[in-house]
Amino acid sequence: MQPSSPHVLLTPSEMGQADQLAMAGGILGARLMEAAGRAVAEAVQARWRPRPVLVLCGPGNNGGDGFVVARLLASAGWPVTLGLLGERQALRGDAAWAAGQWNGPVHPAHPDLLQGAELVVDALFGAGLSRDVDGVAAQLLCAIEQRGLPVCAVDVPSGIDGETGAVRGAAVHAALTVTFFRKKPGHLLLPGRQYCGETQVADIGIPQHVLEEVASLTFENAPALWASRFPWPQPDSHKYRRGHVLVAGGGQMTGAARLVAMAAARVGAGLVTVAAPAQAWSIYATALTSIMVENLGEGDLSSALVDTRRNAIVLGPGAGVTEQTRRNVLAAAATGRALVLDADALTVFTEKPDELFSALRGPCVLTPHDGEFQRLFQVEGDRLARARAAARHSGTVVILKGADTVVAEPGGRAVINVSAPPWLATAGAGDVLAGVAAGLLAQGMPVFESACAAVWLHGRAAALAGPGLISEDLPGLLPQALRQLYEAGESAGA
């Protein structure tokens, strides 16, 4: 993952560092502010026809951007009203400079200014908001929401924490958000993402090389981050070179392991075996054609682990929260082979999570949803921080599943995924994700990249399905998602 990637996400403090590095390199802060305001004004004019617009400016640099927007829209013939939160004489630095370029009246920010407005440019607070919005500012945001006015937000919608996506007291929903240089995590994490509307990233002249000094470890999940490591089959490939996934099948909830197995096969694993207890063997054997089924007798996985060619193992889906599941996980962990642990393979260690973590010997992906995560990890903070802390503590790659899935690895790298549509929230979808991750691991893809690619492909397959999706649809849609990924890579390399 390249530090200069367009998919890099910058926290508010990292963005401040990028600004300072640009200015230390000779770029005036006023020039950056002018470019930011111009980008917003151009975005407004591209989206809306001229109409009465209220530009709301805050007391910091975000407000300075707003003064630039107001000046440029007014010069283009738009009827502009400008409201300032705070006193004009209290503005400092580049914001004071921008205010000095505005020749129109400056009104105290108040909900009464909304009378007659048909559009609001929200430049009250930027991404670095450090406290809850209250007082007149909160009244303004609530009044905008009540009136349903269209909003263009500068950097982030006011009231949204740019680092976590949290609502700080009150916030306004924007139709359009224009941010600068790189997105912030709060543009992608919920609920912030729902407040941003369409998010555009504007180039304001910050050199790309500053990203190497900022050294962010957070990215928006995209094929550009991991496609070079994707295990496409080569002309001399055969099934034994494409890996062998072993899936531990449950004795009663048999659908889960079948979904895992089909997904692993669809994503390219050369062989897939479901190892099932005797009472369920015939169910798996009847339902699966291209997947091998092995009889485990009473359910002890040890015999299935003897074949070392089975280089990626999935445990948990449909397994049951039992002592046998615990023993199977520990036995698989002792082999040092790649593991994907989900569902019951996580829950069974609720009382002794460190017993699991200390047993791991090889690459491992944990795929908890929020409930499973809370049972396994005692960490606080926002979603991104919790996933990172869990990865660091467990020594594994953690996929914290949800509408804003986060993938984190022990060294601190993390991605936020936005490819998943809401209809992916259906029973069994997580089992398919576990199978995709295992199938990529079996083919030799590095563990963090495997997890990122699995999450993206999972979401892409769901998007191809559309509303009405059920989990059984997903494995069959993976070839189409893979074809799109492959053709995009071919086009990029042409």
Image: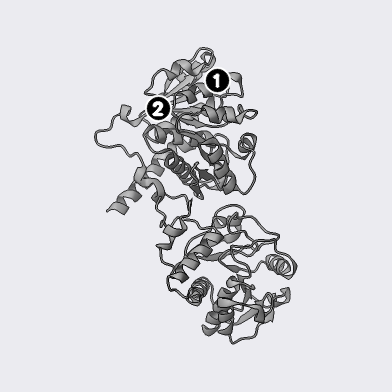
Residue 345 in view: no
Marks 2 and 1 sit apart, C-alpha to C-alpha, by 19 Å
Residue 56's label in the rendered image is none
**Element type where label 2 sits in the image:** loop
Residue 206, quarter of picture: bottom left
Residue at x-position 48% and y-position 42%: 455
Q: Hey, what amino acid is under mark 2?
A: Asn
Q: Is residue 41 left or right of residue 267?
A: right
Residue 327's label in the rendered image is 1
Q: Nearer the viewer, residue 328 or 393?
A: 393
Q: Where in the figure is residue 134, as x and y percent of width and height? A: 73, 65
Residue 234, quarter of picture: top left
Residue 311's label in the rendered image is 2
Q: Is residue 304 left or right of residue 196?
A: left
Q: Name, please, the residue furthest toward the left.
A: 236
Q: Where in the figure is residue 320, as x and y percent of width and height? A: 59, 24
Picture layout, residue 320 above or below residue 45:
above
Q: Where in the figure is residue 325, as x and y percent of width and height? A: 56, 22
Circle 2 crowding by C-alpha within 10 Å: few under 14, some 14–19, many from 20: many
Mark 2 vs 1, N-terminal side:
2
Picture layout, residue 150 above or below residue 376:
below
Q: Nearer the viewer, residue 66 or 477?
A: 66
Q: Name, please, the residue furthest toward the front.
A: 24
Q: Where in the figure is residue 390, as x and y percent of width and height? A: 57, 40
Q: Hey, what amino acid is under mark 1?
A: Arg
**Element type where label 1 sits in the image:** helix
- State how the image is colored: one colour
Q: Is residue 415 left or right of residue 493?
A: right
